Image: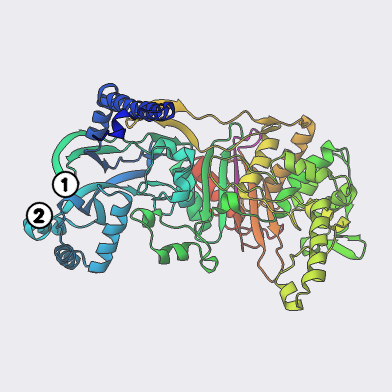
Amino acid sequence: MYLDSDSNRQMTPQLAWRVAIIGGVALIAFGLVFFRLWYLQVLSGDKYRAEANANQVREIKVQAPRGEIVDREGRVVVNNRVSLAVRVRPDKLPEERSERRDVYERLGEVLTMKPDSIERTVERQLSQLPYSPATVKQDVTQNVVAYLFENQEDFPGVEPEQVFLRTYPQRDVGAQLVGYLGEINEEQISDERYNGVELGDRIGQAGIEYQYDRFLRGRNGASRVQVNAQGALVRGLNDRRPQQGRQLKLSIDLDVQRAGQQALGGAAGAFAVMNVNNGEVLALGSSPSFDPNVFSKGVKQSDYARLTDPDNGQPLNNRAIQGAYPTGSTFKLITATAALEGGLITPDTVQYDGGSLQVGDIVFENAGGVVNGPLALRQALSVSSDVFFYRLGQEANGTKLIQNWAKKLGLGRPTGIDLPNDLPGLVPTPEYRDKGFAEYTRCKAEEKPTPEEISFGECGFLDRPWSVGDNVNLSVGQGDLAASPMQLAVAYATVANGGRVVQPRLGQRIEDSSGRPLQELEAPRARKLDIDPAHRQAILDGLRAAASEPGGTSTDVFAGFPIPIAGKTGTAEKGGGRADQSWYAALAPYPDPKYVVVTTFEAGGFGAETAAPAARAIIAELFGAKAGDTSAGSSQD
């Protein structure tokens, strides 16, 4: 008889402990799985069911029209027009690539486009917005639309559609001011100001269109559709209507804007017209100009290159706020203010103008070598005596008196106008030139450029440190000074209104589509400068004499003109064989000015020859007067 030894084997405590541990782990694991399933199916079931349903819904964007832009009288500056576009719906295109290719070839014949170009256009847009229609061509004719409808079976997925295109009925009048649109790019879409904007949307890229984009931009609508797991359309759902953007009312007067553009006559230059008391800009123009309608459907690279070409005058540049020019004798208002407020002279201080002033080894002369004899400030402004102001520049050297007042009056800093790229310009100081000269010297020593490279500015152009001659030049708006017409307008307005540095403004208010006010757009409070009323009056008297008394630099230009003005000519020498820059700054009506008008021509010669007649034409329109004979009879600065 044999005994089975296994029948008497008993489980050891160690083995029992291990079995218990394994069982416990398994029980916990099953418990976790059970509770997770319970959480997903019971507690979160509704949430995930809703998300699953949402995955079945696709939104097809419906473009919203932008708000209109109108002038101060409600006249249209920018609006929209309804256009016919040919679009391709991805859910209705043939699935086979060869069949889609056939559709593109037939469509290319109708639209006079290459099939490859159509295919690339469609695929690019669908890669960004897979369920939205892709636009193949905009602004097609009614005949094209009729043909596509009549032969719909040959063009599956191809549908004509109405779209809104931006239109600029004033064309080149105020083009730089209003700006243009363009598709948002990947860099812009990360900007907080474009929250809610999607790739493919068109936004303001320049001018007013950019500055007030958040108001002008509407809210896109959507056509909602349900798709199955394969992405195929199941049925249409309810739509969300697009909301048009707000209307923007500007302070611009279209008649004055048009007069200014005509006065420039296509020559390189700019003008600014502003209310001296509140900063409202009635006109702001730059030439050469362009037609912003070229951007309505997406600008061609060749057109953009032409508009940015220096040889073509860079029409996209807004010279009124981006121009950086020496101002010539129009700067004498600033020098006069600094000298009076700084105690260098009184309104009745007499200085002798012998036609020239020697400073070191350099002789500074009046324009044409004219000798004016003994002069006080009023007469010095009237005849535009350079020597009178040369002496002030010489005396003020080392004090930065002129520089400080130039910046107080708005030069060397952005004006704050509600436009992008408002450049600060430059008011030169000893520190500026000395630093530039140090960099120039270091560059020559380290890089060792050839003389030809140096002549082309490889090491900069500040090839000497500051000297008293730089301050003498600054006193008459020459040298390194760089200012825009808008900055000069702010300076003249400040003296005219008694010392308030106004901030130029174009936007007046936001309105609904019917013109009902929704929000007033007010400029920040003006900075206040303490200018002695007697000093201010002496300057204005001098400017009045310059435009009205015998010997005044612009008296002949304004002879018989019905609007009394105070004004100053300016002729800036730019060197290098370039023609002189022509300037005029006017305050009207005298003696209680309401408006400042500044005009400049990059190659206009004497201020009385081109800039002053242009200002006269603008003022005539501004006050509803007849411009009359705008020919100049004086060639003095």
Which circle marks residue 273 in the picture? none
On screen, residue 313 above or below 6 = below
Q: Nearer the viewer, residue 139 or 441?
A: 441
How does the figure colour the protein chain or chains? rainbow
Rendering coords of residue 548 (x, y %)? 68, 46
Callout in the foreground (1, 2): 1
Classified by dominant secondary structure, the portion drawn in magenta counts as: loop
Write down the quadrant of residue 376 in the picture: top right
Left/right placement of residue 365 relative to residue 21 reads right
> Is residue 186 rendered magenta in the image?
no
Q: Alpha carbon of mark 1 to alpha carbon of mark 2: how far? A: 24 Å
Residue 156 left/right relative to 302: left
The front one of 542 and 175 is 175
Give whichever of discs 1 and 2 has the lower sequence position.
2
Q: Quadrant of the C terminus?
A: bottom right
Residue numbers of the magenta segment: 589-598
Residue 208 visible in the current orientation: yes
Residue shown at the point (57%, 48%) measured from the top left:
421
Looking at the picture, which amino acid does disc 1 mark?
Ala
Q: Residue at x 65, y 38 (%)?
A: 493
Query: Mark 1 near mark 2, Cβ–Cβ under 8 Å?
Result: no
Label 1 crowd (10 A; few <14 / some 14-19 / many >=20): some
| Residue lying farthest to the top in this orientation | 43
- Residue 162 in percent (x, y) is at 21, 47
| Residue type marked 2 | Phe
| Residue at which label 2 appears | 149
Q: Label 1's element?
A: loop
Q: Position of residue 449 (x, y in %)?
A: 75, 75
The label shown at residue 232 is 1
